[in-house]
Image: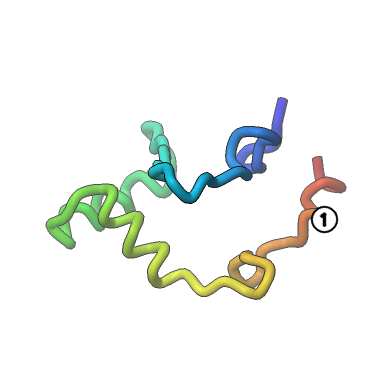
Amino acid sequence: MAVKGRQQRGRSGEFRADRVVRANVPFHPGDELRAKFERAVTGMGVSGNEVLREAFRRMELDEDGRPAGWPAQEVIAEAS
């Protein structure tokens, strides 16, 4: 079984410039982020998609495309 959140080969690493990119993020009952997501949708008065777009606008990424404190791919591979 794959590590939760780890990129799957051939599934999410190829982006065609002429196609729409869709994010599908399931928030199951009991998921700690679900309440935060629901609160943001209600508080901001926008769709869930717009909440995710705003989160990405605010996310700071390093030169390798990772948020601050995110482990390098080698560290993730060793942990699995």
Q: Is residue 80 above or below residue 66?
A: above
Q: Residue flagged by tag 1: what amino acid is it?
A: Val
Q: Position of residue 7 (x, y in %)?
A: 65, 42
Q: Quadrant of residue 8?
A: top right
Q: Is residue 73 above or below residue 12?
A: below
Which residue is painted at 35% across and 44% down in the image?
34
Q: Furthest residue to the front?
A: 18
Judging by the rendered image, the residue that carries numbered circle 1 is 75
Q: Position of residue 37 (x, y in %)?
A: 31, 51
Which residue is painted at 77% across and 61% down in the image?
72
- Considering the image in quadrants, where does the C terminus appear? top right
What is the image's colouring?
A: rainbow
Foreground residue among 28 and 68 = 68
Give SS at disc 1: helix
Q: Quadrant of residue 12?
A: top right
Residue 48 left/right relative to 22: left
Q: Furthest residue to the top?
A: 1
Residue 42 left/right relative to 7: left
Residue 80 left/right relative to 6: right
Foreground residue among 43 and 10 = 10
Residue 43 left/right relative to 4: left
Q: Is residue 57 above or below residue 8?
A: below
Q: Position of residue 43 (x, y in %)?
A: 17, 60
- Considering the image in quadrants, where does the N terminus appear? top right
Determine crowd level at label 1: few under 14, some 14-19, many 20+ residues with C-alpha closer than 10 A.
few
Foreground residue among 78 and 65 = 65
Q: Position of residue 4 (x, y in %)?
A: 63, 38
Which residue is painted at 77% across and 50% down in the image?
76
Q: Total marks drawn?
A: 1
Q: Is residue 73 above or below residue 56?
A: above
Which residue is painted at 63% across and 65% down in the image?
66
